Amino acid sequence: MDYEQIEKNARRRKCLRDILLGLVLCSWAVIVLFPFYWMLLTSVKSYGSYNSEFIPRLFTLSPTLENYGSAFSQVPLGRYFLNTLVFTVITTALMLFVTVLAAFAFSRLRFRGRDLIFTAFLSLMMIPTELVVITNFVTVTDLNLRNSFLGLILPSVTSVFYIYLLKENFSQIPDELYYAAKVDGTSDFKYLWKVMIPICQPTIVTITILKVIECWNSFVWPRLITDDQNYFLVSVGIQEIRENGFGRENIPAMMAAVVVISLPLIALFLLFRKKIMAGVARGGTKG
């Protein structure tokens, strides 16, 4: 009888803990998602109804899509989208090429001073970002690459963290596979392409998605290196909209532009969230 009572009490405590945990998670989800809801709600309110609200309302009975038309008609948002797409695709492709080859060299090739070079390479992560930005700005300016896609792309084609993450994944692949491949006459490049990349695909996909998000949201460097609208990215374009008065005068249209810009990243994360978590988990696991 006592054992049954103890078991019931344990189940009750577990049920209570699950309920409290669920309430905490739901509350946190509401806090995190509320800004997105408010952004979407504001984007479907008319300019007149938004300005007539002395107390902001949490819903609207007359949603409208006219703000989305204004976002594309009053500013060159389409051009900003195209610039960002070009910048993101090229930068991510070059970054993957550099990252995969560097990670393979540090994890599988044997050469003098490899570990020392890799340690020095990791130490670059300790350098403040501001110092790197200043150095890159001076270099790009001296090369007359301001207001160009080349100037936007070059400083972003490598990442110490991504190389380290992929190198740790490559190092988990047994050496016996590499030695067996070399006995069969397989070249290093073919071994990388046929064996290592397929095995570490979750991490490579994760790096790709994170880099796409990083490029899409980049602001400081594009803002610093471009002052020509023909090379503005969406992040810089949104800031330009606000500074030029359109965003200050028409908040609903401004929110519509932000919604349009945010949707690709939200969809990308929702589609590949499992691969992102799997890649990050694999990168932090040995054996």
Image (spheres, grey):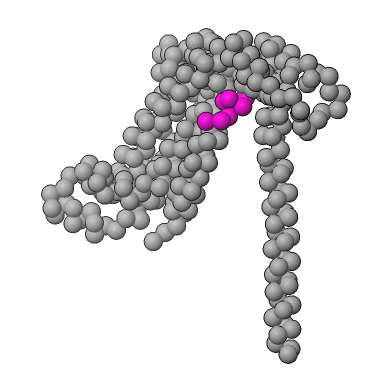
Q: Residue at x 74, y 89 (%)?
A: 2
Queried whether the magenta region covers residue 135, the answer comes back as no
From the viewer's perspective, tell me whether residue 12 is left or right of residue 78. right
In which quadrant will I find the N terminus?
bottom right
Q: Residue at x 68, y 24 (%)?
A: 43
Picture coordinates of residue 206, whole percent (x, y): 44, 43
Queried whether the magenta region covers residue 262, the answer comes back as yes
Label count reads 0
Image-quadrant location for residue 253: top right
In which quadrant will I find the C terminus?
bottom left
The one nearer the camera, 134 or 232, is 232
- Please tell me whether the stretch drawn in magenta is mainly helix, strand or loop: helix
From the viewer's perspective, tell me whether residue 168 is left or right of residue 104. right
- The residue most toward the right is 54
Picture coordinates of residue 257, whole percent (x, y): 62, 21
Span of residues in magenta: 258-264
The one nearer the camera, 196 or 260, is 260
Q: Residue at x 18, y 53 (%)?
A: 181
In this picture, is 209 found above or below 280? above
Picture coordinates of residue 106, whole percent (x, y): 33, 45
Q: Residue at x 74, y 24 (%)?
A: 62
- The residue most toward the bottom is 1
Picture coordinates of residue 15, whole percent (x, y): 71, 68
In this picture, is 115 found above or below 69? below
The one nearer the camera, 236 or 248, is 248
- The residue most toward the front is 61
